[in-house]
Amino acid sequence: MSEPLRFGLVGCGVIGPIHAEALAALPDALLVAAADLDIERAQRLTAQYGGTPYHDLQSMLRHAGPTCSNAYARMATTDF
């Protein structure tokens, strides 16, 4: 079996956990990092799906970027 694709997720609000759940269902994918301006959101998401939480994209790329095969980003929007 080959190495899993390693993902970083940007945005952990309403849709972020849905993306994390989809990644968790893929046998060849691994969530290694998640970033959100609200660090508590990133912490909750990574506690459930794995990975390391970051408070912004720059920190995530600086620390986890070399370990990520792919970064999955969505536009950050204010949750309703």
Image (cartoon, rainbow, N blue to C red):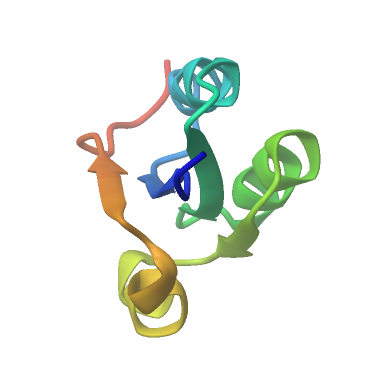
Image location of residue 65, percent across then percent down: 34, 72
Residue farthest toward the right in the current orientation of the protein: 47
Left or right, 26 with reference to 80: right
Q: Residue at x 55, y 24 (%)?
A: 27
Direction bottom: furthest residue: 62
Question: In terms of image quadrants, where is residue 74?
Answer: top left
Q: Nearer the viewer, residue 17 or 80?
A: 17
Q: Residue at x 74, y 41 (%)?
A: 44
Query: Is residue 70 depicted above or below 63 in this figure?
Result: above
Q: Residue at x 27, y 50 (%)?
A: 70
In the rendered picture of this protein, how many numbered marks are placed on residues? Answer: 0
Is the residue 46 above or below the residue 15 in the image? below
Q: Is residue 11 left or right of residue 21?
A: left
Residue furthest toward the left? 75
| Residue 80: percent from left, percent from top | 42, 15
Looking at the image, residue 37 lies above or below residue 7: below
Q: Is residue 16 above or below residue 60?
A: above
Task: In this rendered view, identify the residue nearer to me: 45 or 37.
Answer: 45
Which percent across, then down, holds residue 15? 43, 19
Q: In the picture provided, is 6 more to the left or to the right than 71?
A: right
Q: Residue at image x 45%, y 45%?
A: 2
Q: Position of residue 46 (x, y in %)?
A: 69, 46
The image quadrant that residue 59 belongs to is bottom left
Q: Residue furthest front?
A: 1
